[in-house]
Amino acid sequence: MSQMPQLSACPSCEEPLESGDLFCGACGYDLSAVPARPATSPGGVASAAGQPSGWPVAPETDSSDTPAPTHLPTDLPGTDSAGTELAQPEPDEYPLPAPEATAVPEAVPAPEAAADPRTAAPDPTPPGGTKLCVACRSGRVDPDGYCENCGHAQPRERDHMEQELDTVAAVSDRGLRHHRNEDAFAISAAALPDGSPAVVAIVCDGVSSATRPDEASLAASRAANESLQGALPRGTHPQQAMHDAILSAADAVNALADEPTSAREHSPHQNAPACTLVGAVVAGGLLVIGWVGDSRAYWVPDDRSGPTVRLTEDDSWAAQMVAAGLMNEAEAYADERAHAITGWLGADAYELEPHTASFKPDRAGVVVVCTDGLWNYAEAVDEMARAVPADAAVRPLHSAQVLVGHALDGGGHDNVTVAVVPFPYAPQGAGSA
């Protein structure tokens, strides 16, 4: 039987012990489990309680900068749970696995750079009737209104319109301030019963304070043109044909107000669509003008030796003040009420009074048919004469473009539409054999 170690204090709670105590009287620690006092190590230093006698003793710490030696787990033989020494493996018995070689990925070819659509060459010969981009002039325009070549968004069809026939041309532009073009025009040519030509130009200006003014101007211009195309070849006098054409235009605009009751319930404050109209017919040596509202027609002689004349009188507050002798023209048109119209086409017009007039010019010239988007920048007849190019009779489209540019250069506050109609003067008896 082994002897109990002689302890002076409990190793657990340090309570003083008496000789022969088997348990600590304070904490109940089993004193028989305490190992015997270790022997003095070879170096003369006792080992710590519970540690193997062969554990290397760490050197004393000194104040020098020399680091203490490091002891590795392999410096001492290990033991299993029964205290038996473990056999040391041979150097290569448990070799560490070699790290797996990292596969070097094969080089992936760089993707080919996509061609820049802005510089890609378009098809050399697009099919006939293909709409081309207004920016690059070569790419096709897709159904969404964008160029397939440069991606440029195309203007809406009515933002800028041009049309040219042999004897008449017209240009319409949205202007610089309006969000849409509420003007419209129609130009055409017909033949009188004797085979002589007749030229038609209709210009309409939607009333912006009305509902759907752009639809009103388009409907009016088309209806008036169709009416004249039907009447002139039948031999109807051009002035009567113009009067009837204005009535047809009024009917077309009035029809736009015939909405379902349910539509008005959703927009109870809408008023009827409305527009103004001015038209010109050159046929059989006559110049016929018709109008309702404040769109105008000017006569400009080719040689400028004769006077430029305004052929229409506005249906406006200013014109009424001048006609009544209450103001002179300068005073009336300086008033903020000057452009308030007193006549228009539309279901809520007071009373439709188509104005028509016939003229027999004694020289060659052009008729300028326009909305107030132009004449606001060339109101006086001498201003209009200066704005019209000298070769307007032979280059009507170019002249219409120049006049629209004149309005845009002046500020472009409104939609602007201009038709230029040459009047070829033939003296009596000229051309006979």
Image (cartoon, rainbow, N blue to C red):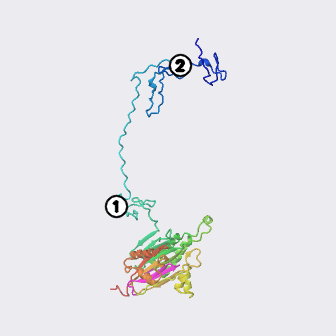
Residue displayed at 60% across by 19% down: 7
Q: Quadrant of the C terminus?
A: bottom left
Type of residue at label 1?
Answer: Thr
Q: Which residue is mark 1?
A: 125
Give residue 424's quadrant in the image.
bottom left
Location of residue 51 with respect to 160 vertically, above or below: above
* Dominant SS in magenta: strand
* Image coordinates for residue 39, horizontal then vertical, percent: 52, 18
Measure the C-alpha gap from mark 2 to mark 1.
Answer: 107 Å
Q: Which residue is mark 2?
A: 38
* Image coordinates for residue 323, horizontal then vertical, percent: 55, 86
The numbered mark, 2 or 1, whose residue comes first in the sequence reads 2
Location of residue 80 with respect to 408 vertically, above or below: above
Q: Nearer the viewer, mark 2 or mark 1?
A: 2
Type of residue at label 2?
Answer: Pro
Residues shaded magenta: 281-305
